[in-house]
Image: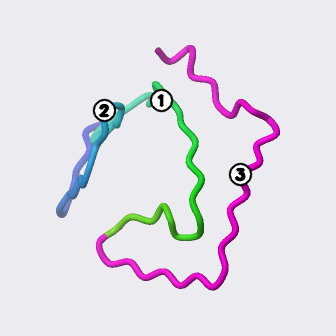
Amino acid sequence: MPAIVIGGIKVTSVGGNGTVNMGDVLQIAPKSTSKTNSGAGGGNTGDFLQTNTFCSVTNTVDPDVLDAGVKGNN
């Protein structure tokens, strides 16, 4: 079934391993993973943002070490 897009589309940035899909898809699987620690509102993206943060604490402890395996996706 084809996708019908009504209105504008804005793609700000797509990195080397990024995926932009428009239309039918069975499965999209990541080829790589990464972990980033940021405070409250640190990962927000958009045109008109307003963040109000009184206090932000980021917990960087990761006891399980591995989060996602992508060996089968390459």
Q: Residue at x 53, y 33 (%)?
A: 33
- Residue 65 image offset from top left, x and y in percent: 75, 33
- Residue 61 image offset from top left, x and y in percent: 77, 48
Q: Kindly report the distance in space between the C-alpha atoms of the residues bearing marks 2 and 3.
A: 26 Å
Q: Kindly report the distance in space between the C-alpha atoms of the residues bearing marks 3 and 1.
A: 23 Å
Q: Residue at x 58, y 82 (%)?
A: 53
In this rendering, the answer to whether 46 lies above or below 17 is below
Query: Of the numbered discs in the image, which one, if any, rests on residue 60?
Result: 3
Badge 2: residue crowd in 10 Å (few <14, some 14–19, many ≥20): few
**24 vs 71, nearest the viewer:** 71
Which callout, 3 or 1, points to the residue nearer the camera?
3
Query: Of the numbered discs in the image, which one, if any, rests on residue 16?
Result: 2
| Element type at mark 3 | loop
In this rendering, the answer to whether 10 lies above or below 32 is below
- Residue 67 image offset from top left, x and y in percent: 68, 34
Q: Earlier in the sequence, mark 2 or mark 3?
A: 2
| Bounds of the magenta segment | 47-74
Q: Quadrant of residue 5?
A: bottom left
Q: Residue furthest right?
A: 63
Which callout, 2 or 3, points to the residue nearer the camera?
3
* Magenta segment, prevailing SS (helix, strand or loop): loop
Is the image coloured rainbow, by chain, by secondary structure, or in one colour?
rainbow
In this rendering, the answer to whether 3 lies above or below 49 is above
Badge 3: residue crowd in 10 Å (few <14, some 14–19, many ≥20): few
**24 vs 54, nearest the viewer:** 54
Q: Amino acid at mark 2?
A: Gly
From the viewer's perspective, is 69 left or right of 17? right
From the viewer's perspective, is 73 left or right of 57? left
